[in-house]
Amino acid sequence: MRFDSIRDLQLFARIYEQGSISAAAAIVGVTPAVASKRLKRLEREVGETLFHRSTRNISPTGMGSVFYKHAMSILALAENAEAEWTGGGEPAGHLRVTASVGFGRMHLGTILSDFVKRYEQIRLDAVFTDRMLDMVEDSVDLAIRICLPMAHPNLIMRRLCSGERLLCASPRYLETHGYPAAPRDLKRHNCVVLGNYDIWKLENATKTESVRVAGNYHSNDGEAVLDAIRNDVGIGVVALWHAGRDIRAGKLLPVLGEFALSPQPEVFAVYHPAQRHVPRIHALIEFIEDKLKVPSDSINA
């Protein structure tokens, strides 16, 4: 493949990700007119229209979306080869990273800003949203996800840290209503429920118990649930990455600590197999893993 073709693929990928020829042109350092000319050249070589164009919008065609997947694989291979030829060097290029709003704000914001200060040739787009973005359709290079371990045929999942959850309540609630001595005692307590998660499975070395809990406060938002528990409403499930500072400060107290909730999620870096050896992806994952200290940073520091 000619060097010009690689540059055209890079431009195409930026147009796809930015949804704008002008924005993509600014990123790669050419004028919008030159970017349009190079896109047309690429479409002639491919023999397909890659974008629908209007006076106000540009959006990928079906073939454009398919071509984007192949383009990213080719660019990843080219970047890997260049890294081998040059003996490595500073990571550079564009990265689009996503995480949940809560985890992103609490644990990733500073880490990502430190990363771009360390690697000044990186252009990083951090998307914190509680909507599960599609890795391909939303042009995501790296997703930080809190979920159960699983095998995914089209993605690599690398564990970063624990996503451990536990039962907690405020000291005032427990002073008023007492501590549950066993999982079944949760039935007589007011429990704060997140979404539809009202069956809590707890296990220790000798037994496993599932308890359907109830209470007068439900929410689909983890921050609202944590606020209610802090505010003496009842017992609820919290994640250490989310409530660790409150536990360390004594504002929340663990309940039924001899039991563990099951199953337990973990925090993963998720990315495409084709980007396994892309220097900027590898550098970012290593950087996050080194800086991310959950839950020890929250509980024991």
Image (cartoon, rainbow, N blue to C red):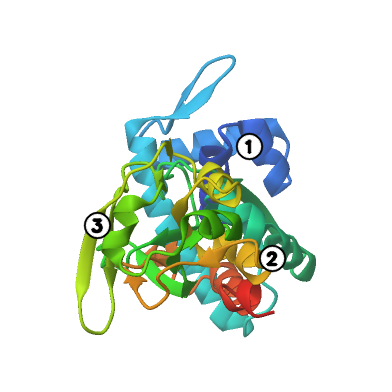
Camera-nearest residue between 185 and 229: 185
Farthest residue in the top direction?
Answer: 55
Instruction: Indicate the quadrant containing the C terminus: top left, top right, bottom left or bottom right.
Output: bottom right
**Would you name the residue on which mark 1 appears?**
35
Gap in angstroms between the C-alphas marked 2 and 3? 38 Å
Q: Residues within 10 Å of mark 1 (few under 14, many from 20)?
A: many
Label 1 or label 3, whichever comes before in sequence order: 1
Residue 111, numbered circle: 2
Name the residue at 51% across, 50% down: 9
> Amino acid type of disc 3?
Val
Considering only vertical position in the picture, is 247 above or below 20? below
Camera-nearest residue between 171 and 131: 171
**For the residue labelled by badge 1, is the local secondary structure a helix, a strand or a loop?**
helix
**Would you name the residue on which mark 3 appears?**
211
Considering only vertical position in the picture, is 274 above or below 21? below
Gap in angstroms between the C-alphas marked 1 and 2? 33 Å
Name the residue at 44% across, 66% down: 166
> Amino acid type of disc 2?
Ile
Which callout, 2 or 3, points to the residue nearer the camera? 3
Q: Are marks 1 and 2 in contact (CB under 8 Å)?
A: no
Gap in angstroms between the C-alphas marked 1 and 3? 60 Å
x then y, percent, for residue 155 = 34, 62
Camera-nearest residue between 5 and 169: 169
Find residue 131 and report its image quarter: top left
Instruction: Indicate the quadrant containing the N terminus: top left, top right, bottom left or bottom right.
Output: bottom left
Q: Are marks 1 and 3 in contact (CB under 8 Å)?
A: no
